Image (cartoon, helix red, strand yellow):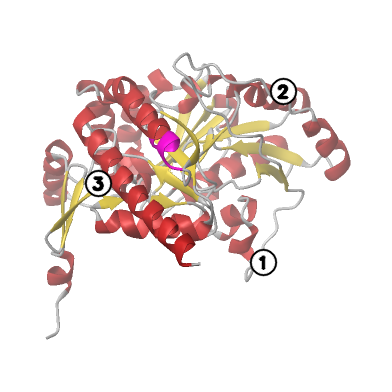
Amino acid sequence: MNKNLESILSRYLGNGPYLNIDGKIHIDAASGTFNLPLGYTNKRIADKLKKQIDRCIHLSSAYTYEMSEYILKKLVKYTPENIDRMWLRDVSGSGAVECSIRMAQKYTGRSGVISLYLAHHGQSLATSQISGNAFRLKNFHINIEGSLKIPVPPSVMVNDNNILQQYSYQEIEDIYQYASSENIACIIIEPILGNGGNIVLPNQFYRTIRDFCDRKGIVLIADEVQTGFGRTGTFFASMGYAKELKPDIIVFAKGAGGLGIPTGGVLMRKELDVLDPFEHSSTSGANPLSLIALNETIDILEDEGVIDNVINQEPILRNGLISLQSKYALISNVRGVGYMYGFDTPSPECAAMAIAVAAKRGLIIRGARYGKSCSLKVRPPLICTAEQLQEILSKLDETFNELQQLSINFTEAI
């Protein structure tokens, strides 16, 4: 029997951090790939969106400037000093990242982008080219003149006092001198490398990069598409865990839409507000639904203590994962900040098996680098309570207990 689209979609029913798939309840510890900081449902946002749909769904950006400025006044409370301008014409992280690069190129008169190995900055041709996973470029060809990638410092674990091991990155001077033509417009960094495997960078690395950019006149971009809007326990990571980065530009998307409503934007110093409207825009950028969702998400984070919840409950997630690491040899290198954690398994195959076993037990988790990494990511919706975090940890325990038994049985069979 043929199914219509509505009947296909009716297989999936969300409720906060839970997703009902064909009658089976799953708790989503991947936040819908970071798009669902408030879970699958939120009545405040849904009601506002319904009202806006009855008014109009699309408006040209010529008519939404006033609303964008209204939202900017809310956001500047959470940005580093001197970041007080916004370009709100995108509905994706890829588009917003490209906008930030254009700003840096026009401002500096240079073209090159320095990015990190394992970085992920988007899915478009340009953002794939500056991302640090070459396998995604195998069949495609683009070049941003002067661009290069640099190694990632060792990932570190943050303790209760947020003190990290010291790390020197003096190699950046040699890389700049010997591997570039000095045609560098910007350095772009994810405060925590999400798709690279939840890599937590040391604070000293941020200080070194900031000093280097100051001396060379290079624009420093914080790609907060994954770390923004409360994910790491502050509104932006560059105002909390990664405050030593002191970026010139902040890019946001994903969680900014609250329930997965596509939206993206760029926050920057006024000197970098250099683009003419025709130099970067999107047909659907700053559409009324995106603006409603973005505005209401900010209000909910403030009114309902969502970020405080992340701060208060993080020890449960961290300590629970560390406890599992002590229990299972298949889990190692637990690391993270806020509700953004990850750990390693022995192999990509083991990670894939863990994802499959977890799904059988009603837990949604994600791997890294499109199945090419041994890492797993645990990133619950920011609304998750202590009880729901314990549910996630319990299902992880069940998952790795099963994997351990499978491993023992396989070894005995040999």
In the shown orientation, is residue 149 left or right of residue 251?
right
Where is residue 202? Give x, y as percent. Answer: 60, 26
- Disc 1: which residue: 141
Determine contact: label 2, label 3, CB under 8 Å: no
According to the picture, the residue beneath numbered tag 3 turns out to be: 289
The amino acid on which the numbered mark 2 sits, given as a three-letter code, is: Asp
Q: Is residue 119 above or below residue 240?
A: below
**Which residue type does callout 1 highlight?**
His
Q: Does residue 122 appear anywhere in the picture?
A: yes
Marker disc for residue 335:
none
Observer-nearest of 410 and 117 = 410
Magenta stretch: give its range.
Answer: 324-328
- Please tell me which of labels 3 and 1 falls first in the chain: 1
Quick one: SS at disc 2?
helix
Eyeballing the image, is 161 above or below 136?
Answer: above
**Looking at the image, can residue 227 be seen?**
no
Image coordinates of residue 64 in percent, x first then y, are 31, 40
